[in-house]
Amino acid sequence: MASILRCPCPATKSTPFSQTPSKPVLNLCSLKFSPRNPIKCNLAEQLKAAENGKPPSSSYSRSSGMDQQSFPSFMASTHFDSSINRNDTRLRIFSGTANPALAQEIACYMGLQLGKIKIKRFADGEIYVQLQESVRGCDVFLVQPTCPPANENLMELLIMIDACRRASAKNITAVIPYFGYARADRKTQGRESIAAKLVANLITEAGANRVLACDLHSGQSMGYFDIPVDHVYGQPVILDYLASKTICSDDLVVVSPDVGGVARARAFAKKLSDAPLAIVDKRRHGHNVAEVMNLIGDVKGKVAVMVDDMIDTAGTISKGAALLHQEGAREVYACSTHAVFSPPAIERLSSGLFQEVIITNTIPVLEKNYFPQLTVLSVANLLGETIWRVHDDCSVGFEPYSSLGID
């Protein structure tokens, strides 16, 4: 059945969250949590699936206070415990309309309430934004992935940034869990635009002082910004979830669906008990069209874990999974931070090729797109902890981010 893993709210301690299994088979010592508290990035409540595998709807509570012990212990150290001021009233978090559920989870983790903001569309499609509380002299974080509809959500983010700048915010950080146009990071043919650079310029010119992004499609996108970029990864959440599954480490093989993702897959494999690596060689004949050619590596009798930064139409990963089955793979798992899910992704992913499709909530998944093999993990705690550290001028390069080695 489909399941969704989400962030527990400190204010709702009666919620019956289940504990993550304590006997992982995989050797993920560098990602394990100490027993300081039971809350983890992917503390889960396995939800009973309704039709089409979708989970029942859940509400997000707002909290005005936060227990100092309620953040994940893998993000904690004596230095940070003593240096981070979690009662700072100069910190403001606002959500756009692209992913309000994730923004609420982030605020919930941080023990804050989302800032009051009015966003509406006029009859002609123009976007109106008004902050309904003062942000003068405040450190403002705007949570808005530029996911589909990309142009709408990007324009909304730009107007939110402009509203904060004109309201005299001291610092404005654009929290972009999914950065749209990231794939347009270079010219593949003559006379093409490099839209990723253009979008970076727009965000900077709108007035943002900093960007917090999750799993950019390519590292060079950070260089397109003339302002600081904090780049964090959703992979630790997926790795920890895989560690809770009863898969023998000797049976694992990590698969990159294309040559461009080898560095990402290699870092992932290193964390999975230094599992062997396989590569699917494909040749693309057009946008959103991929043809699998051959497989480099041995997957016969193995549990194959396919790793990519995003799933769009699922053409690459589904054709790769079919090839893995042809080569004798026992099971195939798909792991991706960003679930764009453009048609016909759902049909391909739910066709029986995958034992499980593991994604995060950087992009909201529509209820109609849930299917039994889908598992959604929450990155709210990762983003929330990073926001605290950015706000308090602490290092963001802590475990497990700094050890992934995929920058």
Image (cartoon, rainbow, N blue to C red):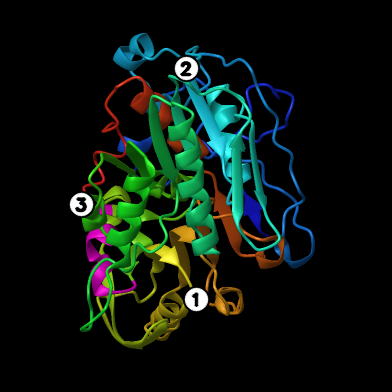
What predominant SS class does the magenta segment belong to? helix
Badge 1 amino acid? Thr
Of the pair 89 and 302, the residue shown nearer to us:
89
Q: Residue at x 35, y 77 (%)?
A: 300
Q: Is residue 67 above or below residue 258?
A: above
2 or 1: mark nearer the eye: 2
Upstream in the sequence, badge 3 or badge 2?
2
* Label 1 element class: loop
Badge 3 amino acid? Gly
Mark 3 → mark 2, Cα distance in angstroms:
29 Å
Badge 2 amino acid? Arg
Q: Quadrant of residue 209?
A: top left
Q: Quadrant of residue 227?
A: top left
Q: Quadrant of residue 368?
A: bottom right
Graded by Cα atoms within 10 Å as few (under 14), some (14 to 19) or many (20 or more), the crowding at tag 3 reads few
Upstream in the sequence, badge 3 or badge 1?
3
Mark 2 → mark 1, Cα distance in angstroms:
42 Å
Q: Is residue 233 visible?
A: no
Q: Are marks 3 and 1 in contact (CB under 8 Å)?
A: no
Residue 313, which numbered label?
Answer: 1
Q: Are marks 2 and 1 in contact (CB under 8 Å)?
A: no
Q: Residue at x 49, y 29 (%)?
A: 167
Instruction: Report the residue marked by disc 2.
Output: 90
* Label 3 element class: helix
**In the rendered structure, which segment of residues is drawn in magenta?**
257-267
Residue 223, which numbered label?
Answer: 3
* Label 2 element class: loop
Q: Is residue 259 in the magenta section?
A: yes
